[in-house]
Image: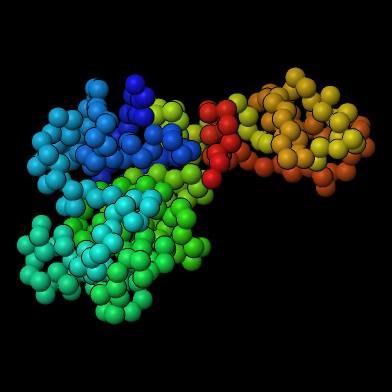
Amino acid sequence: MLRAVDGASFDVQRGEALGLVGESGSGKTMALRSLIGLLPRSARIAGGSIRLDGTELVGASASTLRGLRGRTVAMVFQEPMTALNPVMRIGEQIAETPLVRLGYSHRRAKERALELMRLVGIPDAARRYDAYPHELSGGMRQRVVIATALSGDPKLLLCDEPTVGVDPQSRNAIFELLQQLNREGLTVIYSTHYMEEAVRLCSRIGIIDHGRILALGTVEELLKLLPFDEEIRFPATAETLPLCADLRGQGELATEQGQHRFRPRPDYRLSAFYLATERRELPARIFTVQRPSLESVFLQLTGKALRE
């Protein structure tokens, strides 16, 4: 039996933005689907507890789970067409939750849909209300998915890599919208493999691999897990090869894409490094000293670089 999520434990506070960072297949999507009760038929929860706004989801009835969706929690899927009805006009899809679940009149539900279409940046909302999903670009379809998710005024928004595969303009617009919604109090769980998005949006970040949360905390807390404080990069050339011999045993030394990456031990002084470079008559301009990043933590914990 494959365990897609294996002992993953985390909590999310009201109004927080929590990030889940991991590669495709790491368990991010299954973890989010568990929170909304949308597991595949072949999947089952073998143990543990999932509590959402005081309601226990493990073993909850289908009617309880349906009642939570839309009003308490909503999900934005990575692939828009999995969330949209291809033969239903987009305005009607956005208006469906206010109409059916919130008891709005048809007129008020349409007004709500148009408000959300404008909020997510769909131009000429009144005209596009009657458009079908296939008539929109991928980025615009994803904006429709977000508007649909927001239509029930949920307390928690689950975002499963919402900016993957969309054009740069839409990606930026979607991300800025999520930042705005979080600032206004919406709780967000955001899964991604774009490190910069997790850092910009999320107050805490969980690194997930093979269904396990390997670490969870603020960026500063995660960086403290590294056994080094700086990272020095320099070209992998015949001239720098003797320097590599000097550095062995002084920290972690690796070579990637024509560059050496040296991560000194905490007790190794940078002054000693520069004395070694002067002894080898290497110019200072070829060396770059930088603070480690969240990607460094991911590499340290998983043993692999994060691939897009």
Q: Please report the residue visible at 21 percent of the width from the left and 39 percent of the height from the top.
A: 37
Is residue 176 something that shows in the picture?
A: no
Is residue 254 something that shows in the picture?
A: yes
Horizontally, residue 10 falls left or right of residue 55, namely right
On screen, residue 46 above or below 283:
above
Residue 245 locus on image (x, y percent): 84, 24
Horizontally, residue 88 falls left or right of residue 179, namely left
- Protein image colouring: rainbow
Residue 178 locus on image (x, y percent): 36, 57
Residue 200 locus on image (x, y percent): 46, 51
Q: Please report the residue visible at 44 percent of the width from the left and 45 percent of the height from the top.
A: 192
Q: Please report the residue visible at 79 percent of the width from the left and 25 percent of the height from the top.
A: 247
Name the residue nearer the viewer: 298 or 246. Answer: 298
Name the residue nearer the viewer: 87 or 38. Answer: 87
Q: Where, by quadrant of the figure, is residue 306 drawn?
A: top right
Horizontally, residue 53 falls left or right of residue 19, namely left
